[in-house]
Amino acid sequence: TSRDIPKKIQQHSIKNLLISRQAWLIALYSGLAFAPISAFAGLWGVPFIITKYHLDREIAAHIISMIFIGFAIGAPLAGWLSDKIRKRKPIMITGTGLSLGLMLIVLYAPIHSDLLLAVLMALFGFFTSFFFVSFAMIKETTKNINHFSDRFFIFSAFQTCLSNLICFPLSPSIAYSIPVSYTHLTLPTTPYV
């Protein structure tokens, strides 16, 4: 545990973290890759689906929930695949690129089928979840360092914290980028389902 590790070593771990370019880049990528899930699926997705596709709140909530189903399936598959091919970046880049493409389709293409919209949302969640491979990269960044477990947990906490700090200011930006009048997107005061 951290109590067993001398304070000097813990301070050294934090110092190495703060000067590690790799750790900053991984955390930045992680935050930017997770922001669409946080903002769209968690905040603006249901009002967007209601407004653009003229669906009722319950159906819109079910369609948005498909993002999380895809996310739950994609994350372990991405980890397995990146371990199998022994490469992290191609998985992360592919997932991020495909999720961006899918989101652009949902935002701008005329989709006339609820089922197609649900499938696109599931695929968006599936490919967005590939960012979880970045946690394996953090582990590998700390692999050959004394007091590995201490360093890994500090780096992992840093990545998670910075990711969430990136998501917070991006939520309004994402709302303004949605191609439906921003004034029509209001957050409901009651639960969706």
Image: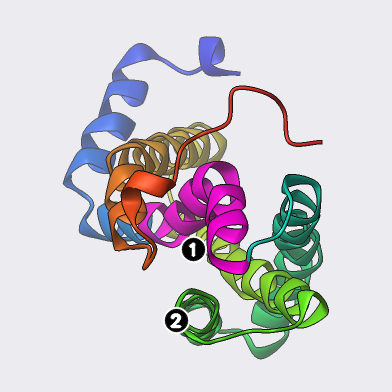
Left or right of residue 50: residue 9: left
Q: Residue furthest left?
A: 19
- Which quadrant of the figure contains the C terminus? top right
The residue drawn where x is 71% and y is 64% is 75
Which amino acid, mark 1?
Met
Residue 139 seen anywhere in this rendered image of the structure = no
Q: Which badge, 2 or 1, comes first in the chain's sequence?
A: 2
Q: Position of residue 126 (x, y in %)?
A: 69, 71
Examine the structure image and report whether residue 113 is included in the region drawn in magenta: no
Which amino acid, mark 2?
Tyr
Examine the structure image and report whether residue 44 is included in the region drawn in magenta: yes
* Magenta extent: 30-53
The residue drawn where x is 54% and y is 57% is 51
Q: Position of residue 1 (x, y in %)?
A: 61, 18
Residue topped by disc 2? 108
In depth, the one of 160 and 33 nearer the eye is 33
Q: Determine the image quadrant of residue 100.
A: bottom left
Residue topped by disc 1? 137
